[in-house]
Image (spheres, coloured by chain):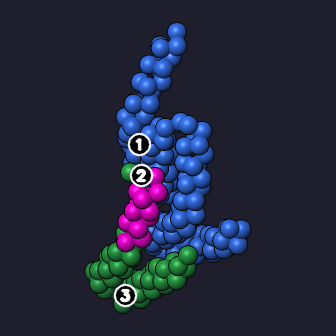
């Protein structure tokens, strides 16, 4: 795990320097280079994250909480990562307007996904009171 | 961690910018523009496949 991180950090620095070099002549290539590095690094990171989610699900099942509640949580986390990925790339390309639009849309979609959890929480509280 | 992808894109970027400068010197600006667009399309094709791969990983992982 740690050696993977060291590789990612090293390659990240090299990519940043190369992107700076290319950005002088061809700005769009610099942005695409950053995008490529981002995609590769996240693929490596998420392929490692699979084990964590498995352990999480096991603990939740053992604790007796039905795993149906975990599904929206994971979905919102995934949506947050994708939104952040897109926003950073757009900001890198200098398109702040597009970045903020993606961010707003992402927040609304995440709210839409988390509505069932909110309603079940409210019903639970109402039943207790 | 396929690193060669990044260096391939960097190589294409540098090649396109050099070609661009050379073509601009011999005042063929339209061909320079065409090579820039061609280089960008090639690079975007590579990167789009990588992004699709990323989004599939996220879909599989977070249960979309």
**Residue at the (47%, 14%) spot, across then down:** A127
| In front of the other: B50 or A89 | B50
Asked if badge 3 and badge 2 are on a common chain, one would say: yes
The residue beneath circle 3 is: B23
From the top left corner, tell me how far across and down residue A74 is, in percent.
48, 46
Rendered green, the chain in question is B
Q: Residue at x 59, y 43 (%)?
A: A62
Quadrant including the N terminus of chain A: bottom right
* Mark linked to residue B63: 2
SS assignment at label 2 = loop
Q: Main secondary structure of the magenta part?
A: helix
Q: Which residue is mark 1?
A: A106
What residue is at 43 percent from the left and 34 percent from the top?
Answer: A114
Q: Is residue A111 visible?
A: no
N-terminal of the pair, mark 3 or mark 2, is 3
Residue nearest the viewer, comparing B35 with A5: A5
Q: Callout 1: residue from which chain?
A: A
Q: Nearer the viewer, mark 3 or mark 1?
A: 1
Chain that the image shows in blue = A
Residue range corresponding to the magenta coloring: B49-62
């Amino acid at each position: 795990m740690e050696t993977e991180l060291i590789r990612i950090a090293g390659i990240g620095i090299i990519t940043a320097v190369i992107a700076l070099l290319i950005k002088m002549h061809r700005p769009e290539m610099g942005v695409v280079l950053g995008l490529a590095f981002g995609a590769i690094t996240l693929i490596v990171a998420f392929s490692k994250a699979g084990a964590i989610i498995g352990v999480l699900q096991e603990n939740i099942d053992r604790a007796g909480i039905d795993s149906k509640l975990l599904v929206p949580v994971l979905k919102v986390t995934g949506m947050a990562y994708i939104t952040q990925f897109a926003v950073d790339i757009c900001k890198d390309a200098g398109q702040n307007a597009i970045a903020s639009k993606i961010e707003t849309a992402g927040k609304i979609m995440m709210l839409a996904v988390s509505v069932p959890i909110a309603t079940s929480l409210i019903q639970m509280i109402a039943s207790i009171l | 961690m396929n690193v060669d992808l990044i260096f391939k894109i960097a190589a294409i970027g540098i090649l396109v910018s050099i070609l661009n400068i050379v073509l601009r010197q011999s005042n063929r600006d339209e061909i320079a523009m065409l090579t820039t667009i061609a280089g960008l399309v090639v690079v975007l094709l590579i990167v789009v496949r990588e992004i699709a791969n990323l989004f599939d990983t996220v879909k599989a992982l977070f249960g979309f």
